[in-house]
Amino acid sequence: MERTITKGLHHVFLIILICFSAMVTALTDDFLSEKINEIKKLSELSQQIDAFYLLKQNHNLSDEQQARVLHLIAANLAKSGQLNEALTPLNQALALTKNDAKKADIHRLMGLIYFYIDIPEAAIKYYSQSLIYQLSQNEQVKAANLENNIALAYEKMNQYARALDYYQQAQPRYEEFGTEQDVLDIKLNRAGLLSKLGHNFEAISLYQTLINDHSDVLDDNSLILAHSNLAVALNAVGQHKEAVSHLNSAKQLLLNQDDNYQLASVELNLADSHIWLSNYHQARVHIVEAANISAPLNNPTLNFSIAYHRSRVAVVLNEPDIALTQINKAIDIAKRFNNKHQLQKAYSQALIIYGANNLIEKAYALREQQYLLNNEIKQQRMKELLAKEQAKDERTDLQDRVSQLEKQKQIQDLAIEKSKQQRIFFIVAGLLTVLLIVAAQRRAHERKAKKQLEVIVDKRTAELQQTSEDLRQASLVKSKFLANMSHEIRTPLTAIIGHSEAMSNSHYDMRSFNKDLGIINNNGKHLLDLINDILDISRIEENKLELDISTFNLNCLIDEVSAMFSTLAHKKNIEFQIINSLDDDFAIQADQFRLKQILLNLCSNAVKFTDTGSVTLSVRETFTGVRFNVIDTGIGMEEKQLEEIFDSFTQGDSSITRRFGGSGLGLCLSEQLANLMSGSISVTSEVNKGSEFTLHLNVEKSKLSKPTNRLKRDDKAIFEGNVLIAEDHEDNRELIARLLSHLGLNVSAVANGKEAVEACKNGRFDLVLLDIQMPILDGIGALKQLKLSGFKQPIVAITANTMQHEVASYLEQGFADHIKKPIEQDNFISTLKKYVSYDSKTRSHKAVNFATTIDNSDLAANFIAGLADEKAALKSLYMAQNWDELQNALHKLRGAAAMFNYHSIEEAADYFEKALKYNDKDAYPEAFEGIDFALSSQDE
């Protein structure tokens, strides 16, 4: 009995002790709240901070109360701009508090501080921790505020896709639970992000709705932001006059604000709009105004924009020095602050300026940097796409964690309710709860581990299945390739064999000889074209194909295409028309041969697949280059056919091959060549209505010398001096010697570099012309020996190797200049003028348009007469597999053929020489047949 009474008294005593502790704590909390209110009445933040630090030193405060004071200290430090200093008391408060609501408030403040000290990754981390708690408590407005803040942090990191995801989560919460101002603010943020993502039309619609329907609710700052960002989006879609109107509205509102950064930004946007409207002088006024406003700010973003816009205006107003200075300044700013998007813009503008000022080497160096930068930006975009997928996983994880917290809260509420009813069982209930949580977590961990294992197994299985499918597809592609090759080669071979057998028949009708020979020739050329296309594609894929970049008038190329297809179209009774909106002197820097190859392919297909109607080639200049549209009214294609149209050996269907022929390699090759030249090809089509192929080249517009500024015909000038020409091909040597003699020069001619070195030792020459590839001693070797011997006169390379990297190599090794084969009159004379004395006032019979008055018929005849020997020599080298000597002989032949305008021999020799250069042994037999055929044709 006594034992029972004693046990009861212990229980009563325990309950009284707990109640007393709660009362003491409550009194202390009231005391603390009173002290806090007194401190908040102090006028200076510094005084409040000092008072809170003194209050924290009170040893009677519990851990939770100290955490409360530390939180207030941190908040005041943040208000006073001491953001980094505020982090220390916040971390101390986190360590002291066990209250989830207090932790959520601390996490939110830490997120704000990290955002403003420009560490957005940390801001997102703490915002997310606070968000989990607010969602578990169903605090929708607070949750929406945190989601908006997370989106702003992701936006600062340029992860726009993830930012948009959080804005889209926050907006419905504001619409249901927030104020009208909350809804308008989130819409403004979302519209700005849509514009950054390039969703300009959606952004425009949203901004217009905000301005038109809510201008009476939005404050001035919000209206300024809406007008400014709407103008940016309007500029992006080409509505520049509307953009100017909205920017003027923003400017009027800003005149009443003390925000120089925003005002300068508006001035720059006005300048951008006027540039698009071709109001360049007005644009310059706005740029100067922006520079004056932003000068005290020294903001890198504004400084970059001012320099960039000044360079754009200077280019148009023909101020090359200003354009170069300003774009270089913009590049320096972008590099200094590691802004890749600014640097990408600056590089594109700089390439235009360098091209316009003929700074070719700088342009090429900058183009390489741009290529690397573009790859970095592409990788960043891929990372953003991956981050978007990760965001989905984060949301799922967030929901799981919120659900888990809600369950924990329910368990805690149940425990509290039970403690009110019977305090004595509190410890037991707590232990049971802990045991249940541990068991639940253990089971959850086991389930999670099992699920992860299943995911890994499924992933490995899918990878194996994908690998198996890839191998199967590769086998199918190989089989399809062999089948197509077999069909494509057998078809012309059947015609060749059939007609050749018929011609060898003793009863053959000789009246059909020319016709059958033409059929054999055409089918042979078809085989050659097919193999050339396959080799070109192979070289592109192996990065062996080199572009020959040069500056040329694009209108001349278009005229050539027009001449080629007008007759072909006329034969089919269809119309071929050119719509050319380019200026007469429009020139670009590109590979002229490859561009022509693409256009011929597109136009050929259009004419081939069009039976009635017309084929149109449209050409126009774009902001970044040139766009070609080939439009036909032919058979068209279905959507499924369009998906495969650029694959190798692909045509619309088998019936198309039977009706129209072709290997299906042309479009594949054209697309790869376009990509190689930083361009693209796209297609739209409708069955029985026609197709439209669009080729867009990102090329630099260049300026060819105008006729009035070109060299005046120096056939009115007599040159004086001694010139040495070293050329191994006898006919070439004689031709160049005649040209020089005709201009009044004393000429000595030798056959190789060794003889050139000896001649320079024994004679005096004002100029030496050296061929690069010669026997015994080549041009480069001769140059080195002459330099070592102390020869001071200019030495010029004369060669058919005209690739830019080859020319640059010659100049780096010490050649004074370069003359290309075949000889071009203006270029030849202008080069001589640099190094040989002449009198432009004196006229002579030798100064009458030498290119047309010199009789070279005997040299051309000698060249043709020697082709049989050339053919025999090449065959001997080929059979002996003496590849080095064969390559030298082909180079020599190519140069001579070019000089005498035998282009079929030049092209065949060039093809064989490149096959040897790139060690493309599979192409040797076909290349040998090509040069043999070209030489035989001329010999006959």
Image (cartoon, rainbow, N blue to C red):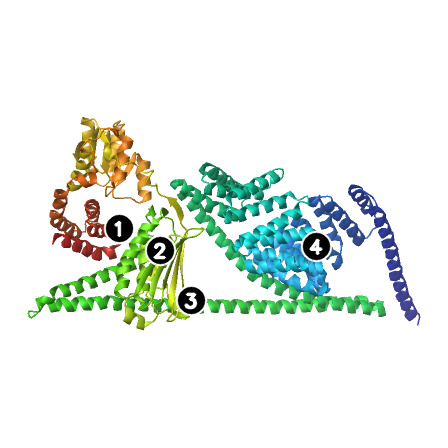
Q: The residue under label 2 is which amino acid type?
A: Leu
Residue named by callout 1: 914
* Inter-mark Cα distance, 1 to 2: 18 Å
Q: Determine the residue positioned at 18% across, 41% down.
A: 732
Badge 3 or badge 4: first in the primary sequence: 4
Indicate the secondary structure of the residue bearing disc 1: helix
Q: Which of the pair 795/384 is nearer the observer?
A: 795
Mark 3 residue crowding within 10 angstroms, few (<14) / some (14–19) / many (20+) = few
Circle 4 residue: 108
**Residue depicted at 60% across the width and 43% down the height:** 264
Q: Amino acid at mark 3?
A: Thr
Query: Image check: 454 left or right of 320?
Result: right
Q: Nearer the viewer, mark 2 or mark 4?
A: 2
Q: Callout 1, which amino acid?
A: Lys
Percent across and percent down for residue 316 are 46, 43
Residue of label 3: 467
Front residue of 244 and 41: 244
Q: Which quadrant of the rendered structure holds the C terminus?
A: bottom left
Give me the C-alpha separation between circle 2 and circle 4: 54 Å
Task: Name the residue furthest left.
Answer: 506
Q: Is residue 307 visible?
A: yes
Given contact means CB atoms under 8 Å apart, are the residues at marks 2 and 4 in contact?
Answer: no
Dot placed on the residue nearer the N-terminal end, 1 or 4:
4
Q: Residues within 10 Å of mark 1 (few under 14, many from 20)?
A: some
Q: Quadrant of the N terminus?
A: bottom right
Residue type at tag 4? Arg
Of marks 1 and 2, which one's residue comes earlier in the chain? 2
Q: Residues within 10 Å of mark 2 (few under 14, many from 20)?
A: many
